[in-house]
Amino acid sequence: MAVLSLDRVSKRFGARLAVDAVSFEVQEREVFGLLGPNGSGKSTILRLVTGYLYPSSGTVRIAGIDVVRAARAARERIGYVPEDSPLYGHLRVVEYLEFMGRLRGITGGALDRAIDAAVERLALGSVRTVIIERLSRGYRQRVSLAQAVLHRPELLVLDEPSNGLDPRQIIELRGLLKDLAQDCAVLVTSHILAEIERTADRVAILLDGRLLTVEQIAHEAVPAPPPSALEALFLDLTQAKAMR
């Protein structure tokens, strides 16, 4: 069974048809990219998948659960990082994760274990007690990812996750996405075609709300390509910690 399934999904805003009968599926442990120019419907599709919007027609299912008929059950299976993800800057990292965990219904020892696992996976140990507003853009992005995986979702939805990151942070984000996809399906949008090509297993290309094609990019058995010569030189010269 697909983790995410869209069946002839359309969305109207008045007279404007923002998404036009789009169908595709995302499988377990797959990184699935959405590509298209501005206004192609990418962000609208993400909002339909996450339940922020309801489709005008068609069906969206998460692990077989209809996002309209069983909205809460569907949302429990999703982790979401929107573009420019809002964070409570006055909280320390661990306080923010505790707050987000409780919103997800995680309490007691289970919450402590979930936070420890997310902190370790996203390499946040050195900033665990730091106030969020004092973190770099890279670390704030890691905090956003940590809150999204606290409850071990079946689907992780990322809207432009590399937006605002420097070259080193973008390179490290590739590895993070591949690592996170070991436990869940990942649906990601990006304006950077090269990043989608390096990280996605398949990609859907959209134009004016219509799905033009779904293409295979790489098989799971094929290892991720190494950094290019320029990337390797950049990493060697900067000598900075990942995602700083």
Image: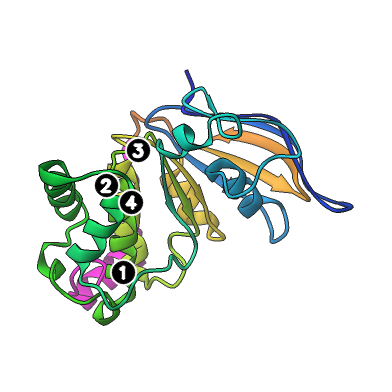
Label ID, residue 162: none
Residue at 72% across / 53% down in the picture? 40
Residue at the spot of label 3: 153
Mark-to-mark CA distance, 4 and 3: 14 Å
Residue at the spot of label 1: 140
Q: Nearer the viewer, mark 1 or mark 2?
A: 2
Judged left or right of residue 120, residue 231 is right
Mark-to-mark CA distance, 2 and 4: 11 Å
Residue at the spot of label 4: 103
Mark-to-mark CA distance, 1 and 2: 16 Å
| Mark 2 touches mark 3? (CB < 8 Å) | no
| Mark 3 touches mark 1? (CB < 8 Å) | no
Residue at 66% across / 42% down in the picture? 54
| Residue 123 percent across, percent down from the top left | 17, 58
The range drawn in magenta is 223-244
Q: Is residue 238 magenta?
A: yes
Q: Nearer the viewer, mark 3 or mark 1?
A: 3
* 29 up-or-down from 227: above or below: above
Q: Determine crowd level at label 1: few under 14, some 14-19, many 20+ residues with C-alpha closer than 10 A.
A: many
Residue at 37% across / 63% down in the picture? 170
| Mark 1 touches mark 2? (CB < 8 Å) | no
Q: Is residue 22 magenta?
A: no
Mark-to-mark CA distance, 1 and 4: 19 Å
Label ID, residue 150: 2
Residue at 31% across / 38% down in the picture? 223
